[in-house]
Image (cartoon, rainbow, N blue to C red):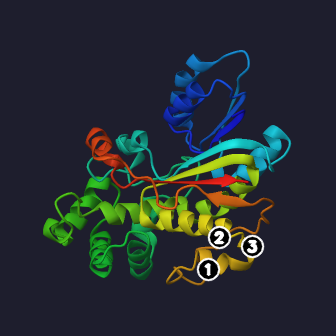
């Protein structure tokens, strides 16, 4: 492997281990929209610098992969031996209260992966209609009691503006009892997931990056995607299935990402970006790779992780 692209750099953990494992890597590109992640990963990756290695860190959203590769490598097609997408929010972000991702720590209702963007969770819970709130909690969080949660949020904000994570978590905790969600899941888990996905357009971003990542692979190159909830995994699974069947993604895009309902007429979840695929592929993981009991014991947050891999042929 000569060229490796980590589309979700984070703290640099995956990049560190992969670059260390493959001394043949000559070009390593790390992409992340979070400036904090760049500071941490840069410090970690400096240990691996060697004469034949060129590490390039790019602070952009991986939805712009096509443009990033064109700018950095001069082309976005047939340039990578390995590409990694570790989707969702990182432990580093979850554990930082000021980022607003955690319902267990008090912080502002932010939830932006990129602090330079404008939309925050606070704006959503205070200004979106009860219907809009309900729909994202249902569609992005899979919350069975979505109507009730949306109603309680709407009632609470009419008394005072909602601005903190614990404030919102308390409202949800008084609405949904633990017996209704199980001992392992906090009542606020699904609503916080829904808000985070809405704030960062996470599903739309995945739809945009997958065709670009597939096109970027050289023959023999592999794309690995790690997902943490069913919405992400469904997109990766169906996209890989279409590639494996050598079908034209642009003709079948409605099949790939047909959501049950759009949020509204002006804010629908888009289908795959129209990028014609230039290669053939085969899926290497007919069933996703999931963590072992030992891995889950060591890292409980990995319990819902699924790894899928496709190879360019």
Nearest the eye: 266 or 300:
300
Return the x and y of residue 313 as percentages of the image width and height.
Answer: 73, 54
Residue 302 vertical placement versus 239 (above, below):
above
Q: Residue furthest top?
A: 51
Q: Residue 270's image quarter?
A: bottom right
Q: Is residue 111 left or right of residue 295?
A: right
Q: Is residue 24 left or right of residue 86?
A: right
Return the x and y of residue 62 as percentages of the image width and height.
Answer: 64, 50
Q: Residue furthest right?
A: 74
Residue 11 visible from this viewpoint: no
User: Disc 2 marks which residue?
Assistant: 242
**Label 1 Cα crowd, 10 Å radius (few <14 / some 14-19 / many 20+):** few
Confirm or deny contact between disc 2 and disc 1 (CB under 8 A). Answer: yes
Label 2, label 1: how far apart the Cα atoms are: 9 Å
SS for dot 2: helix
Q: Residue at x 48, y 58 (%)?
A: 120
The circle on residue 248 is 3
SS for dot 3: loop
Q: Residue 183's image quarter?
A: bottom left
Nearest the eye: 222 or 269:
222
Count of picture labels: 3
Q: Quadrant of the N terminus?
A: top right
Label 3, label 1: how far apart the Cα atoms are: 11 Å
Return the x and y of residue 58 as percentages of the image width and height.
Answer: 67, 38
User: Disc 1 marks which residue?
Assistant: 255
The circle on residue 58 is none
| Mark found first going from the N terminus, 3 or 2 | 2
Q: Residue at x 31, y 81 (%)?
A: 147
| Mark found first going from the N terminus, 2 or 1 | 2
| Mark found first going from the N terminus, 3 or 1 | 3
């Amino acid at each position: 492997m000569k060229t490796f692209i980590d589309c979700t750099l984070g703290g640099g953990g995956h990049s560190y281990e992969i670059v260390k494992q493959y001394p043949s890597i000559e070009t390593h590109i790390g992409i992340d929209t979070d400036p904090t992640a760049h500071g941490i990963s840069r410090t970690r990756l400096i240990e691996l610098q060697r004469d034949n290695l060129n590490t390039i860190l790019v602070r952009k959203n991986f939805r712009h992969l096509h443009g990033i590769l064109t700018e950095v490598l001069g082309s976005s097609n047939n340039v990578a031996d390995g590409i990694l997408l570790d989707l969702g929010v990182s432990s580093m972000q979850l554990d930082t209260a000021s980022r607003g991702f955690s319902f267990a720590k008090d912080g502002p209702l932010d939830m932006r992966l990129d602090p330079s963007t404008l939309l925050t969770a606070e704006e959503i819970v205070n200004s979106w209609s009860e219907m809009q709130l309900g729909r994202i909690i249902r569609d992005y969080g899979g919350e069975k009691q979505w109507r009730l949660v949306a109603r309680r949020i709407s009632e609470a904000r009419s008394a005072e503006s909602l601005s903190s994570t614990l404030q919102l978590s308390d409202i949800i905790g008084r609405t949904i009892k633990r017996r209704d969600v199980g001992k392992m899941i906090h009542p606020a888990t699904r609503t916080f997931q829904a808000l985070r996905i809405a704030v960062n357009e996470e599903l739309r971003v995945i739809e945009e990056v997958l065709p670009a990542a597939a096109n970027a692979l050289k023959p023999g190159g592999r794309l690995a995607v790690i997902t943490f909830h069913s919405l992400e995994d469904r997109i990766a699974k169906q996209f890989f299935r279409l590639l494996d069947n050598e079908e034209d993604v642009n003709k079948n895009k409605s099949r790939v990402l047909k959501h049950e309902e759009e949020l509204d007429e002006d804010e629908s979840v888009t289908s795959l970006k129209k990028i014609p695929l230039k290669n053939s592929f085969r899926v290497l993981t007919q069933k996703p790779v999931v963590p072992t009991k030992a891995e889950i014991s060591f890292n409980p947050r990995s319990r819902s992780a699924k790894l899928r891999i496709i190879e360019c042929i």
